[in-house]
Amino acid sequence: MSDTDDDSPDRGIRTYVLRSGRMTDSQRRALVELWPRFGVEFEPSRPLDLGALFGNGGPTVAEIGFGMGVATWKIAEANPGTNYLGFEVHRPGIGKLMSELEARGIGNVRIMSHDAVEAFEKVIEPGSFAGLHIFYPDPWPKKRHHKRRLIRPGLSEILASRLAPGGYLYFVTDIEEYASWSLEVLSRTPGLKNRFGGYAPRQEWRPETKFEAHAARDGRGRWELVFERS
């Protein structure tokens, strides 16, 4: 997929660009051999049954755009009583995460390789998630591309509605303008309340990724937001 302004009804407005990347033999093997174990197919004809998917009645936390999945598997490993559903379209990252899950014996993660926005609209029922993680999403810095941001008016209401009462939305970015934008958008989203009244302190349970470490070395800051569903 290329970065274009093609927002026809058939294509929809995408919050991501499919980027090519080198895939290792391990990642390629995981995509073939481990997908039946960890993968979730997008079936728009019926809602996703999280209880059946994980085989338990535990709470489920969603993550949109997990990249290479480092924070995903570390958080899941530390919280075996919670289920985690990750959304990602970058195939090397999906393969890498599944390889880590297998190697570490982590069984409380599932992956959907599909546009998260469409999945939230068509197969995720309201009140499904105990939490939603959005770590370092594409900021789409050009003004004409703001309509592609994951945190934007209209879409924020959909994301909030998929949280159960008391559920949280945890957003992190290294772009100050996007942080300010997201703070304003989320503060105006019905049903959401800012847990800290403004930017949140770093949540110590969230692992630092290589991207985050590189951003810090490059002098980029970090802004965090935690909102709760009333």
Image (spheres, rainbow, N blue to C red):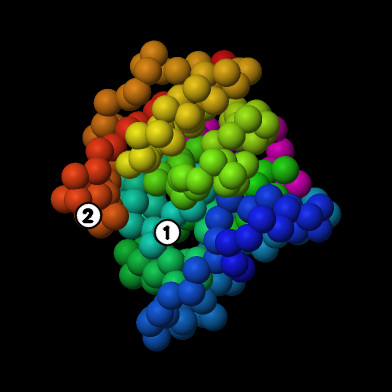
Q: Main secondary structure of the magenta part?
A: loop
Q: Residue at x 46, y 25 (%)?
A: 183
- Local packing at callout 2 (Cα closer than 10 Å; few below 14, some 14-19, many 20+) is few
Magenta segment range?
122-131
Q: Residue at x 60, y 21 (%)?
A: 189
Q: Is residue 197 left or right of residue 31?
A: left
Q: Secondary structure at mark 1?
A: loop
Question: Is residue 111 at least partly visible in the picture?
Answer: no
Q: Find numbered disc 2 in the image and state the secondary structure of the residue it sits on.
A: helix
Q: Which residue is mark 1?
A: 67
Q: Is 206 on the left-hand or right-hand side of 109?
A: left
- Residue at the extreme top of the image, as rendered: 197
| Distance of label 1 from label 2 (alpha carbons) | 15 Å
Q: Give the x, y percent position of residue 178.
A: 43, 36
Residue 133 position within the rendered picture, expressed as x and y whole percent measured from the top left: 46, 41
| Residue 26 marker | none
Q: Does residue 135 lie above or below 197 as drawn?
A: below
Position of the N terminus, as image quadrant, is bottom right
Amino acid at pointer 2: His
Q: Is residue 124 magenta?
A: yes
Could you say which disc has been placed on residue 214 in the image? 2
Inspect the magenta stretch and tell me whether residue 49 lies in it.
no
Q: Which residue is rendered at x = 34% and y = 51% of the image?
A: 71
